[in-house]
Image (spheres, rainbow, N blue to C red):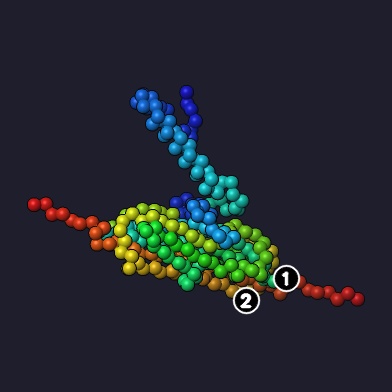
């Protein structure tokens, strides 16, 4: 019998002798598998499977505001490029610990990302404003002149 | 660009499941935390993007260390969301500390959305080298 792949190994002879141990082992494995399934993004709605920093896009009047959470990053760690409707964001985070330190818990990680999003309008490239404050990057993108809505007088 | 699997970020933000419920109606998240220990210190690094320097509260009570960070909700007031991948909320997390900490000498630094807490170990908790006769 092959058994379930999420349950660990088939019981050994010793485990059968101390049946309880192996039963608990299997329960733990199952629980861990379920927890992993809950915490990964498999069931999420995100468009990025590789886990780039997530991005929010807002409308502020006629401008578009893009925000990204980038804790610990310096200005020089992030690169922003705009061309037409496309906004490209790339960067890198590096986490270092001193040598001779024992690590008890590790939830933050080093990563690099490179992502391009297509905006709803072309951007007035000379009036883009970007700030990185308290670990949040905010980019304000005003629409290009020819993309601004024009009011039409009704005759 | 070639992507390196090792460089990718695992997981996303986790909403807080605290033992005590909060009295305000707001979202709370669990800040991602690294904890390292050296001979002198226990150091915690917590990612709390959006939290300003003066909006962090650190408490140590009966060996339970509690960190609260508030974001500025007003920043999002007049904005219309068009597309969202993450939600914003305050941060809160508690830790039960195992080794004795010198409470008067805790150092907290908030920079670029990362809180660094340096907790110096109390004299009696530092490892002692015992010489063998």
Q: Which mark is residue A36?
A: none
Q: Chain of mark 1?
A: A
| Residue under label 2 | A127
Which residue occupies 45% across, 67% down? B57
Residue B26 in picture, x, y percent from top left: 58, 61
Residue A152 in the image: above or below residue B99: below
Please tell me whether mark 2 sits on a helix, a strand or a loop: helix
Please tell me whether mark 1 sits on a helix, a strand or a loop: helix
Share a chain, discs 1 and 2?
yes
Tell which of B93 and B49 is nearer to you: B93
Quadrant in which residue A127 is drawn: bottom right
Instruction: Judge left or right: residue A99 versus residue A121.
Output: left
Image quarter (top left, top right, bottom left or bottom right) of the C terminus of chain A: bottom right
Residue A35 in the image: above or below residue B2: above
Q: Which mark is residue A147?
A: 1
Instruction: Judge left or right: residue A105 versus residue B76.
Output: left
Residue B121 in picture, x, y percent from top left: 29, 61
Q: Chain of mark 2?
A: A
Instruction: Judge left or right: residue B113 versus residue B75.
Output: left
How far apart in space, not on screen, are marks 1 and 2 (Cα)? 14 Å
Residue A9 in picture, x, y percent from top left: 42, 31
Residue A134 in picture, x, y percent from top left: 50, 69
Q: How many marks?
A: 2
Which residue occupies 47% across, 26% down? A2
Which residue occupies 39% across, 58% down? B64
Pointer 1 with pointer 2, Cβ within 8 A: no
Residue A126 in the image: above or below residue A83: below
> Is residue B90 visible to the viewer in this orientation of the structure?
yes
Which residue occupies 47% across, 67% down? B56
Among numbered discs 1 and 2, the one appearing first in the sequence: 2
């Amino acid at each position: 019998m092959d058994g379930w792949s999420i349950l660990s190994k088939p019981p050994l002879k010793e485990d059968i002798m101390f049946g309880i141990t192996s039963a608990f082992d299997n329960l733990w494995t199952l629980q861990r598998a379920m927890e992993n399934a809950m915490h990964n993004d498999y069931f999420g709605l995100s468009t990025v499977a590789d886990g780039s920093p997530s991005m929010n896009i807002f409308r502020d009047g006629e401008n578009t505001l893009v925000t990204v959470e980038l804790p610990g990053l310096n200005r020089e760690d992030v690169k922003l490029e705009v061309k037409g409707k496309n906004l490209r964001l790339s960067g890198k985070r590096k986490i270092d610990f001193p040598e001779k330190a024992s690590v008890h818990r590790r939830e933050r990680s080093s990563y690099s990302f490179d992502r391009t999003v297509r905006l709803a309008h072309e951007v007035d490239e000379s009036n883009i404003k970007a700030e990185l404050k308290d670990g949040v990057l905010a980019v304000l993108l005003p629409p290009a002149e020819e993309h601004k809505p024009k009011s039409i007088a009704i005759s | 660009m070639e992507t390196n699997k090792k460089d990718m970020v695992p997981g996303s933000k986790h909403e807080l499941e605290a033992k005590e419920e909060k009295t305000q109606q707001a979202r709370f998240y669990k800040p991602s935390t690294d904890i390292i220990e050296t001979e002198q210190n226990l150091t915690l690094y917590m990612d709390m993007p959006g939290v300003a320097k003066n909006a962090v509260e650190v408490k140590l009570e009966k060996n339970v260390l509690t960190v609260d960070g508030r974001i500025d909700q007003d920043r999002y007031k007049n904005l219309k969301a068009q597309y969202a991948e993450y939600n914003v909320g305050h941060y809160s997390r508690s830790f039960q500390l195992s080794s004795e900490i010198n409470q008067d000498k805790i150092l907290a630094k908030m920079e670029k959305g990362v809180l660094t807490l340096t907790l110096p170990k109390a004299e009696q908790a530092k490892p002692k080298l015992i010489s063998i006769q």
